[in-house]
Amino acid sequence: MRPRQQDHWTQVYTQKTPSEVSWFQAEPEATLRALERLHVPSSFSFVDVGGGASNLVDALLQRGWDDVTVIDIAGSALAAARQRLGENAARVHWEVADITGWQPPRRYDVWHDRAVFHFLTEPDQRAAYRRTLLNAIAPAGLVIMATFALDGPEKCSGLPVQRYDAETLSAAIGSGFTLVEDWREEHLTPWEASQWFTWCVFRRDQD
Ligand SMILES: C[S@@+](CC[C@H](N)C(=O)[O-])C[C@H]1O[C@@H](n2cnc3c(N)ncnc32)[C@H](O)[C@@H]1O
């Protein structure tokens, strides 16, 4: 665990409510549309990496997903999500972990990462992320990732980010994955600032 990173993110979610952060979405539309378009069944296991206090978990539970894990470096983020969900929080597996050092206890059918990978600005961090991903994702599993686009912001939450298009994100994820689809999305922050994202869905190649 990187203590400074963890302190940063723990403070963010202690000082702001989930709807005050720039990455807030009332509805995680891009993810939900992709799951529908790709006919991903709700019986699949799903891990939201760096899920923070996102509403995605609520939307998945409403749609009948019953094997959902949310991981985040900040316990305060997960506490906010759990509080919002009330008794439904017990239907989710929550884990406080740095994704670059996480040892997955099992494999998942869907790996979801919105706005987390782009904080890994050093090659060794990205290599560690890929190691975790390879240990966590099932053969033929789907990897849904969103990062700031090449014309997106240079920083998020005061931290520098690495920006991607589909080509460079595919290269960063590396061999063993096939790009299924990609698209650009304009996210509007709660104060209506425009942020362009690159979205990619990869399928893990069969072993
Ligand atoms: C910009 S927010 C996005 C949150 C969420 N994915 C969403 O779309 O609302 C980035 C999230 O990644 C988490 N995070 C940052 N670095 C991480 C790491 N190394 N491991 C796990 N989580 C991390 C932060 O705590 C934060 O919740």
Image (spheres, helix red, strand yellow):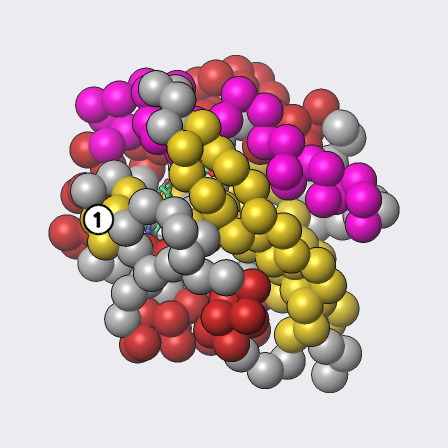
Q: Is residue 103 left or right of residue 60?
A: left
Judging depth in this view, the residue of 89 and 154 nearest the camera is 154
Image position, residue 193 (x, y; %)? 36, 28
Q: Is residue 24 magenta?
A: yes
Image quadrant where one finds the C terminus: bottom right
Q: Is residue 40 left or right of residue 129?
A: right
The structure residue drawn at horizontal position 70% and vertical position 59%, both measured from the top left corner, is 181
Judging depth in this view, the residue of 69 and 200 nearest the camera is 200
Q: Is residue 122 visible?
A: yes
Q: Is residue 30 above or below residue 122?
A: above
Image position, residue 116 (x, y; %)? 40, 51
Question: Where on the picture, by quarter, is residue 80?
Answer: top left
**SS at badge 1:** strand
Image position, residue 97 (x, y; %)? 36, 52
Crowd band around label 1 with a 10 angstrom C-alpha radius: few (<14), some (14–19), many (20+): few
Q: Is residue 170 left or right of residue 162?
A: right
The structure residue drawn at horizontal position 52% and vertical position 52%, both measured from the top left corner, is 198
Image quadrant where one finds the N terminus: bottom left
Image position, residue 30 (x, y; %)? 63, 38
The structure residue drawn at horizontal position 72% and vertical position 77%, both measured from the top left corner, is 205
Q: Is residue 138 visible?
A: no
**Which residue bears the numbered disc 1?**
159
Q: Is residue 177 left or right of residue 16?
A: right
Q: Quadrant of ligand 1?
A: top left
Question: Where on the picture, by quarter, is residue 81?
Answer: top left
The structure residue drawn at horizontal position 64% and vertical position 31%, both measured from the top left corner, is 29
Query: Label 1 sits on what residue type?
Result: Leu
Q: Is residue 33 magenta?
A: yes
Judging depth in this view, the residue of 185 and 123 nearest the camera is 185
Q: Residue furthest left?
A: 4
| Magenta region | 12-38
